[in-house]
Structures are given as structure tokens and as C-alpha cells.
Image (cartoon, grey):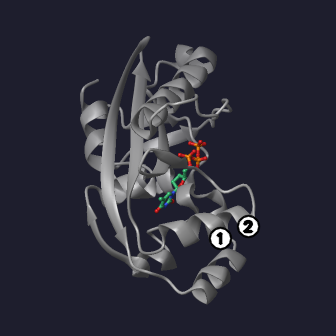
Amino acid sequence: MNNRKIILASRSPRRVELLAQLGISCDIMPADIDESCWPGEDPARYVQRLALAKAQAIHAEHGQRGLPILAADTTVALGNEILGKPADAAEALAMLTRLSGSLHEVHTAVAVMHEGKAQCLLSTTRVHMMPVPLAVLQDYVASGEPMDKAGAYGIQGRAGAWIARIEGSYSGVMGLPLHETAQLLNAW
Ligand SMILES: Cc1cn([C@H]2C[C@H](O)[C@@H](COP(=O)(O)OP(=O)(O)OP(=O)(O)O)O2)c(=O)[nH]c1=O
């Protein structure tokens, strides 16, 4: 990509940071779309549908600027069950209690839309979380850190100490897989 500026259809500060790692600057234009899951929809399809919907929503408003529009969506999956962002502290604790000691997946889809064409790639990472004592989880929830994160944890914060191993992409777990993002942007 010659012009290193894009429109980022996301309010996630992690995504801005990760894009900067690729040397890409962005105008931030968050998309407000319906994030509810369709009945029976599997997590990998769900994140791809949402990433594309976010990119399309911002393309409809700002596509005339001629900049590529990038959007992403991240979810945690326990089997086929989707764990999104917790609605409140009780839900955050319930999610963390289930993820403690689990092997789960984090799916992030990244979509780029430019000149009316959309492309989307999926990154799936298996995450092994050690068993975490309830009191530690309660303290973590009280810190407020889980509230804007899928699955109620951030690998990039103190929950990183609980992650014994991942198979996949660290940046994908954080919300924007750098390898897939660079592939999409280089294609334009
Ligand atoms: C699992 C995990 C998720 N997350 C974050 C990444 C995403 O920002 C968030 C999942 O919510 P998303 O709906 O993907 O994104 P968002 O609401 O933050 O931003 P927008 O919809 O405007 O694009 O969870 C982490 O930061 N670290 C982690 O380890």
C-alpha cells in the first residue's frame, strides 16, 4: 500500500495501536451495528459477518473519501458458544469462571473494503488458560479491565499471566491479527 492512511471502523484502542505497529495511521470512525448473533450461527461465521457489516456500514457513509476501510470483530468461543463482551460485572465473573482452566478459541475476522469491494480474513487462536483462583478473578473484575473485552479478559493486560500457551496469533487475540491485516492491505 503506497498511502499508509486508512479509515478504521472501530472504537478499539488496541486496534489503533496494532495498526501503528504496521506503520499505518487511521481516521477513527466506529460503526454502530447490531451485534446480536443469529440462532445457530457458529463463532467463526459470526465474526466474519460482523467485521464485514462494520466495514460496509462505514463505507456507505465515508466510501467517497477513497481510503480503504478496515474493520474487525473478535469473539471468544467455548466450543460453539460465543462469549462476547460482558454486560456487567456478574457476567464478566461468570465468563471468567468458565474460561479458567479451559482450552478455548479466540476468533478475529478482519475486513477491508475499498472501491466497493470487500475482503475478509479469519484468524483463529487456541488459548490455554490455567485455573485461576476465584478471589483473583473477583479482583480482576473489580478492576474494570474485563468490561470492553470479548470473554472478559485481555491477554495484553494482567490476565496475560494466566495464559499458559497459545496456538495462533497473539495480535489476533488482542483484536487485530497483524499478518492477515497486512495481507489485506497489501492487496490494494
Ligand atoms: C480476548 C481479548 C479480546 N480483546 C478485545 C478486542 C476487542 O476490542 C474486544 C472485542 O470486541 P469487538 O466487538 O471485536 O470490538 P470493540 O467493541 O472493542 O470495537 P468495535 O466494535 O468498535 O470495532 O475485545 C482484547 O483486547 N484482548 C483479549 O485478549
Kindly identify which residue carries mark 2: 90
Res 173 → quadrant: bottom left
**157 versus 27 height, above or below:** below
From the image, tell me which residue sits under label 1: 93
Q: Give amino acid for label 2.
A: Ala
Q: Residue furthest top?
A: 116
- The answer to whether marks 1 and 2 mark residues whose Cβ atoms lie closer than 8 Å is yes
Residue ID at (25%, 56%): 168
Give whichever of 36, 117 is nearer the camera: 36
Task: Report crowding for label 2: few under 14, some 14 to 19, many 20 or more residues within 10 A (C-alpha).
Answer: few
Q: Amino acid at mark 1?
A: Leu
Q: Is residue 62 above or below residue 154?
A: above
Q: Tell me if 114 is positioned left or right of 50 in this view.
A: left
Does the rendering let one see residue 139? yes
**Left or right: 96 in relation to 163:** right
Residue at 48% over, 33% down: 46
Where in the figure is residue 43, as x and y percent of width and height?
Answer: 45, 40
Rendered residue at 62%/53% (across/down): 85
Q: Position of residue 74 (x, y in %)?
A: 48, 46
